[in-house]
Amino acid sequence: MTVSWGILGAGRIAESQMAPAISAAPGHELIAVTRRDLAAAQQFADKHGARRAYDSDEALLADPQVNAVYVATPPHLHARQARLAAQAGKHILCEKPLALDTGEAQRMIDAARANNVDLTVCYYQRFNARHQRIKALLAAGAIGQVTAARISFSERFPPQPGVWHHDPAISGGGPLMDLGVHCIDLIRYFCGPVQSVAALVDTLVDSSPVADTATLLLRHEGGAQTVVTSHWTTANHDPERFNRVEIYGAEGTIVAAPIQAKDSAGTLQLITAEGIQDFSVEPGGPRPHLALLESFAAAVAGKSPNPIPGEEGLAGLAVVEAARESARSGRRIELA
Ligand SMILES: NC(=O)c1ccc[n+]([C@@H]2O[C@H](COP(=O)([O-])OP(=O)(O)OC[C@H]3O[C@@H](n4cnc5c(N)ncnc54)[C@H](OP(=O)(O)O)[C@@H]3O)[C@@H](O)[C@H]2O)c1
């Protein structure tokens, strides 16, 4: 089955990553796109080979040739668009964060289930070849029992005119909902579900309605203690080095950077009593977006499970909400 895509919100991420990935992926085609301005939508369609351009969600969702949509608008629109897409019988690949909060995320999951379509979260870094290697190394017991980890994704990102990320009604708020959700998803992927959360979430530098600096301490089922740092207030002059994951076990250590590569490129070392094994990937390596599309296609064809179901996006948002509650109350929050 060919996956025939409509893109809701053909903006920056659709332009830089997903439209080129759809063009490059066998068994995928780009049928239609939306932007608020029809001429801009048409321009995007022409550039990326989409057959039609629309300026409304409803028009794209009524297109009978479209059987899946990529929701690539800012977070405040995800829940409504996913519900409409589900009701139109389209499978959904939704950008992160899945929604503004867990309530919205649950309603998206319910709508997908009620309409018998897949809802997949676009946590493409699960498909980074180095991250899949880490997962396999952990499963093989390469560092023994995992006891601790640290993951960081930060940058200096002050408020700027015309940029929605500092508007909590649109973004859901701050680096936690932007960069932190990637960290939380990856650390859950590596270390398993999160059981308890303690956090500091502060506004330290900019005059912004959102908190700009967040540090989370998590305990995972199985006991591992992990630290997530996600800031918009730390100058990061070497993101290839500082956006990194370190995983510590009773018998060894795994270190990898960066966590945001679009071609899996970067370092990965396994350090044990036997020495250092290097699994680094050179630039031009496997593209996570292509692997995600391949998995998505297999899932909607009924050949394999949904690779990153909506429940995974909801679980990440539950950690964000627990972190905020912990920061507010000064207590550690237990997740059910
Ligand atoms: N996975 C990743 O690494 C990654 C990276 C970047 C972004 N993202 C996520 O992708 C999503 C989009 O981010 P982006 O940077 O691509 O955003 P963007 O370029 O600012 O906007 C994306 C699209 O949404 C439309 N849009 C923006 N604000 C709107 C509003 N108030 N009402 C209706 N439509 C609106 C834009 O419309 P116009 O075209 O008409 O302007 C554009 O088509 C977000 O959820 C973001 O967190 C993910």
Image (tube, rainbow, N blue to C red):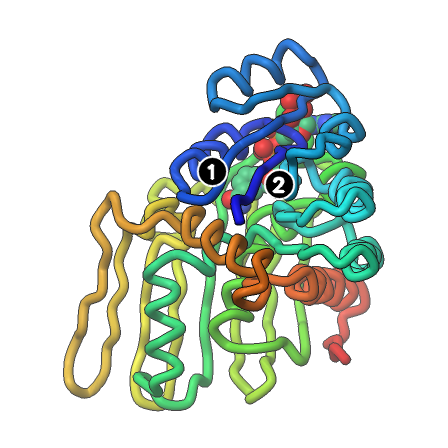
What's the residue type where badge 2 is placed?
A: Tyr
Is label 2's Cβ within 8 Å of ligand 1?
A: no
Pick whichever, 236 or 48, lies toward us.
48
Mark 2–mark 1 CB contact (< 8 Å): yes
Which quadrant of the figure contains the C terminus?
bottom right
Rendered location of residue 263, percent (x, y): 33, 46
Drawn side of residue 274 relative to residue 323, left or right: left
Drawn side of residue 6 relative to residue 242, left or right: right
Mark toward the start of the polypeptide (2 vs 1): 1
**Which residue is tagged 2?**
70
Residue 163: in sight, yes or no? no
What's the residue type where badge 1 is placed?
A: Ile
Pick whichever, 100 or 233, lies toward us.
100
**Mark 1 neighbour density, 10 Å: few (under 14) some (14–19) many (20 or more):** many
Is label 1's Cβ within 8 Å of ligand 1?
A: no
CA gap, disc 2 and disc 1? 10 Å
Tell me the residue at 56%/60% (across/down).
Answer: 299
Residue 286: in sight, yes or no? yes
Question: Ligand 1, what quadrant?
Answer: top right
Pick whichever, 116 or 201, lies toward us.
116
Rendered location of residue 175, percent (x, y): 61, 47
Q: Which image quadrant is residue 40 in? A: top right
Helix, strand or loop for disc 2: strand
Tell me the residue at 19%/67% (across/down).
Answer: 278
Helix, strand or loop for disc 1: helix
**Which residue is tagged 1?**
22
Tell me the residue at 76%/75% (across/down).
Answer: 331
Q: Which image quadrant is residue 157 in? A: top right
* 246 versus 2 height, above or below: below
